Image (cartoon, rainbow, N blue to C red):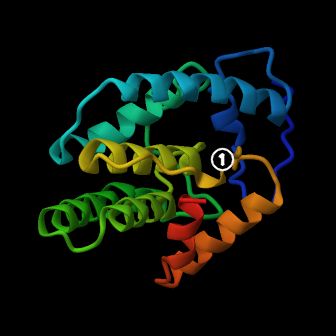
Amino acid sequence: MGLDFEYNHSQTPIDEEEKAGLLISTITTLGELDEFEQHNIEKAVLWSLNKKFTPAQIFTSDFIKNLHKRMYGQVWSWAGEFRKTDKNIGVPWHRIQLDLQQLLDDAIFWHENQIYSPDEIAIRFKHRLVSIHCFSNGNGRHSRLMADITIEKLYGQPIFTWGEKNLAKESDLRKEYISSLQAADQGEYTSLLSFARM
């Protein structure tokens, strides 16, 4: 296929079998891949804008898979399918369903019992989702859109700004984002909550 992507240290490499699922044969660089993915993601965002969702719809494995397929289905044949290999981050692939179900149950509990503020529910959900790393690619962008849908559809709040930049590209802003995720790994959500509203 001739795909030889160069990844920065915080990106999850796509293995050869996953690269075979690329639906657009003209893509040869990571920059081109990002452009096609971004175009597909924008369609998924538009789809979500005019929809109403309940917690019982959002906090499900089916919704998570469907949103990923809408975000990447025109680029990757495996979009919307949980990964079947281990990556440099995320839980072992065979634990994805179990860990995800625990997160979904927790999120419903947080929502029903108002355990955290709306922003913190959405951000904790996003953080745990990206930590599980359900998919072969696009987990960061997928988890951010899940947080946006959660905050807007369930709580009527503005979507997060995420620094108003493309966080898929290497930059000082991406480094700050990764640093705030690492703090959240240690149970400190203040910096991630602040970053989401920059």
Q: Residue visible at 38% across and 29% down?
A: 48
Q: Is residue 85 above or below residue 63?
A: below
Q: Please state if 41 lies on the left or on the right of 60 as rendered.
A: right
The percent coordinates of residue 108 (x first, y second) are: 19, 59
Q: Residue visible at 61% across and 58% down?
A: 87
Tell me the kind of residue under disc 1. Glu
Q: Which image quarter: residue 196?
A: bottom right
Q: Is residue 66 above or below residue 91?
A: above
Q: Residue visible at 42% across and 51% down?
A: 147
Q: Please state if 80 lies on the left or on the right of 86 as rendered.
A: left
Examine the rendering and report whether any part of residue 155 can be seen. yes
Q: Is residue 120 above or below residue 13?
A: below
Picture quarter with the C terminus: bottom right
Q: Residue visible at 19% across and 48% down?
A: 55
The percent coordinates of residue 30 (x first, y second) are: 81, 36
The percent coordinates of residue 85 (x first, y second) are: 55, 51
Picture quarter with the N terminus: top right
Examine the rendering and report whether any part of residue 60 can be seen. no
Q: Name the one closer to the observer, 21 or 70.
A: 70
**SS under mark 1:** helix
The percent coordinates of residue 193 (x first, y second) are: 50, 68
Q: Which image quarter: residue 52?
A: top left
Residue that badge 1 annotates: 164
